[in-house]
Every structure is written in C-alpha cells, then in structure tokens.
Amino acid sequence: MIDYGKVAVLMGGTAAEREISLQSGQAVLQALLNKGVDAVGIDTREGFIQRLAVEKIQRVFIALHGRGGEDGRLQGCLDSVGLPYTGTGVLGSALGMDKYRCKQLWAGANLPTPKAMLLHANSDWDKVIAELGLPLMVKPASEGSSVGMSLVEKAEDLPTAWQQAAQYDPSVMAERYIKGQEYTAAMLVINEQLHSLPLIKLEAQRKFYDFVAKYEANDTRYICPCGLEASQEQALQQLCQAAFLAAGASGWGRVDFMIDAQGQAWLLEVNTVPGMTDHSLVPMAAKAIGLSFDDLVLKILDTSF
C-alpha cells in the first residue's frame, strides 16, 4: 500500500454548505480509516492551520464545499505551507466556484452554456427578461448545492429572486432556463488519466434539482446507466472533460449539464469538491464501474500526489 503519511480530512467550515461538508468529511474519514490510512478529521471553523502543524499532517483530503474550501482560498493556504491536497488547485477552484466567470470562459472556448447576466440592485429587470426570456434561473454566482437559487416564471418575481440570492452572495446571476433533462458527469483521474465516469440522469419531482431534491427528498431519481445511446454518452463525456479541463480543474470533480428538447447539451457548472454523502453523485457513478466508496476515496487521495 502507498504510504500517504498522516492525512487530515478538512471539513465543516463556515459556508452555507457546512452541514453537508461535515457529512462528506465523516464519510471520507471513515473510508480512509477502513483502508488503514492514518487519518484525522479537522473542522476548519476552528484554528485549523495550527492543528495541521500540531498533528504533523503530511497530506490533506479536502471535503469542504462552498466558499472558503472550494474557491481557491484553502488551496492557496495549503500551497503556501507546502502541504499536498486532493483535487483542483487555486485557479481552477476559483473559476469553478464563480459560475458566471466559468461560463464566460466556456463561451470563449466555444463550449455550449446558457446565456447569463449579472444582477444588482439597479438592474433593468425588463432588459434582463428581454435578453434571457422567461422562465429563467437566478442563483448566487459563488454558492453550491443550489443554495439561494430560484426559478423565475413571472417578471414581477425577478427582484425578489435577486434579493433571495443576494443574501448568500453579493454576486448574483440570471441564466437562461433550459427545459429538458439534467445529467451529471463525475470526473476522476486514475493512473494519471482523466476519466469521465458513467453519466447519471437526474429526475427531481420538484420544479428543478434544488437543495431539497439533492439532500432531503426521497423521491429524486438517479438513473445510471443513464439510458442514452453509447455513442451519445461518449460524446457528452468528452464534452464534459473538455469543460472540466478548460476551467483549470484537475484530479476529481463533477460537471453538470442539461439536454434540451432538440438534443443540444448545455453546460451548467463544474464542481471541484462535490459531495461525498450517501445521496452524492460521484460515489454513485463510481459504483457503476465497480468502484466501492472506500476505494473511490483512496483514488481521490491519490490525486494529492
């Protein structure tokens, strides 16, 4: 077995996704212990940098979702003290967290993504609707787990949706709504080669795949194999790999996308530290290729080398 040294699983933090991160972190920690890795869980809400030194940590598994853990700040901190960590570095983390700038990058690379605009208190709401149409999605630009996100179907609801999203992030974006099927592609580097795991089709029994559908509802359906023709699935996996690499992401992660009624794929976002709970999608995709949760966690830990 590889000598990983003493591993810290960083979790919790102070972002809106704190509770999900604690669940992910505990699951990851247990998997590492099951595999005989010398590992300890650390909640970054308390002075964790000192704890890393006290514990003589040699490697870090990042299980922090959202700002402070997934946006490049933690990655920069670990770089500065010379500690290797799982997944994406500073630039890719920052881009992945900022959905609007990630979409600008994708558009510049001729990758298909729905048109979007930034909103603020003095936005011309009529102009936004003229540009993007109705319905449209409003979301914090730098939050995950669909926190603060809403589907706007009537023009008069747009200012309220902006206010709701702005509670979580001063940067709020409106995005053209894509009516169709939602899919996700889990990304994992195995033996230095980036692989897209089998696609998962998501069927939420709500208006869209929101926080409740992700973490609380028992009627959300996850379909894997996803039901697409093999050649179409392969083409979509390649598109998602291109999107992942264009955003500067590496190691492991997830790319979410929609397919509209005409069969056109639309990239939504890249997640550089996806959930690792019992509801999570990356473990589900790994299971489809015979990779157990514990083995998946070790593969992700390998991305720290």
Image: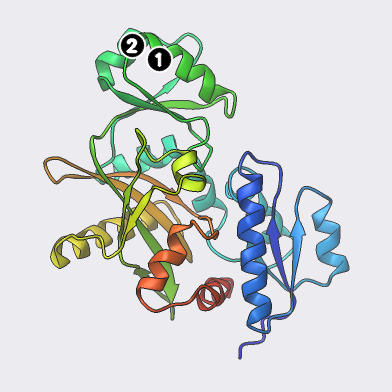
The residue located at (61%, 43%) in the rendering is: 17
What's the amino acid at mark 2?
A: Ala
Q: Is residue 64 above or below residue 286?
A: above
Q: Residue furthest front?
A: 218
Q: Is residue 227 above or below residue 130?
A: below
Q: Quadrant of residue 196?
A: bottom left
Q: Which residue is mark 1?
A: 158
Toward the viewer: 150 or 99?
A: 150
Q: Residue furthest bottom?
A: 1
**Whole-percent x, y for residue 192 in the image:** 43, 77
**Left or right placement of residue 234 versus residue 208 in this view:** left
The quadrant in which the N terminus is found is bottom right
Q: Which residue is mark 2?
A: 155
**Left or right placement of residue 147 versus residue 257 in this view:** right
Tell me the tag on residue 293.
none
**Whole-percent x, y for residue 108 in the image:** 30, 41
